[in-house]
Amino acid sequence: MEPLEDLGAVINSGLSADVTLLISAVDPDKRRSFYKTLAKVAEIEVFDEPDMSRSGWEENVAEIVRSEAEKRAMRFEEEALELFVLSTGGDSRAIGNELDKLALYGSGEAITSDQVHELVPVSRVSVIFELGNALGQHDVTRALRLVRDLLDQGETAIGILLATLLPTIRNLLLAKDLMERYRLPRPHAPFAFVSTVNRLPESATEHLPRKKDGTINSYALGLGAMNAHRFETGQLVDAMQACLDANLQLVTTQLDHQLVLTEVVIKLLRE
């Protein structure tokens, strides 16, 4: 590391006014004196990829997509933006490439979900998102087809249950409870629910699921709020119990996995 420390000393001593020094590094060690020197005398910009392992990453990526779309004089319908975010998975190169493709074939109007479906390749994440959407929109046929598609792609039944079915039902129930208890309006988009929830007293939100940084996962809750009007509270409670029963069946019995998941979907979406 000595050469870096020597370079740091040179930079710290000052460069000529006609010299511009650009340094690019992957995963720099912020504990090193060289980085600390740069932080004092230079302008540092960090371009981290979104952490896909942390809940709420969709909100950060959506802002990136919005910014990149504006540079191309493009805009998205809200559902199309959500689908695009999950289809590209936060990959900056994929985001740029797919935006260029949509710009080429677009008509100048707001990008729609149909256009994203038609032009942007489907990813595993987007299929999971579509399943959550189908459940929220009370589309039993599409939900069952997507469950089958995920199983055919090699997803485990317990993974589908715990990563998609259960969180979707839980967010529907939590959102419906908040909306009924505090007379909250149905949002037109997930992000619109954020400010509404933030205005509630702390006692009203202390039970809500949190991200690793301690903030509410308002994006997922907002999706639930958009669709909660389609369900009765008792119906959602029964569906939560169905998830528990399905979990036990998947780990303790030899029942057909697709059948177990189908029962959860049917109990949630029954008329």
Image: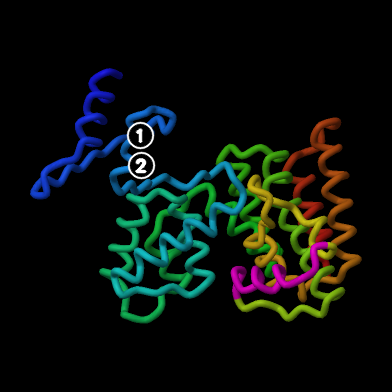
Q: Is residue 271 above or below residue 166?
A: below
Q: Which residue is mark 2?
A: 39
Which residue shows up at 43% across the image and 53% down it? 88
Which of these two is toward me, 19 or 158? 19
Query: Do we see residue 36 in this rendering?
Result: yes
For the C terminus, the quadrant is: bottom right
Residue 18 position in % (x across, y down): 8, 49
Check disc 1 and report its element: helix, strand or loop.
helix
Q: Is residue 191 magenta?
A: yes
Check disc 2 and report its element: helix, strand or loop.
helix
Real-space Cα separation, disc 1 to disc 2, in angstroms: 6 Å
Q: Which residue is mark 1?
A: 35
Q: Is residue 11 magenta?
A: no
Which of these two is toward me, 238 or 35? 35
Which residue shows up at 72% across the image and 39% down it? 158
For the N terminus, the quadrant is: top left
Residue range highlighted in magenta: 189-202
Amino acid type, residue under disc 2 in the picture: Ala
| Res 137 quadrant in image | bottom right
- How many marks overall? 2
Point out the residue furthest to the top here.
2
Residue 185 position in % (x across, y down): 73, 81
| Res 256 quadrant in image | top right
Which residue shows up at 86% across the image and 37% down it? 248
Point out the residue furthest to the left here.
18
Amino acid type, residue under disc 1 in the picture: Tyr
Query: Do we see residue 138 in this rendering?
Result: no
**Residues at badges 1 and 2 in contact (C-beta under 8 Å)?**
yes
Residue 48 position in % (x across, y down): 41, 45
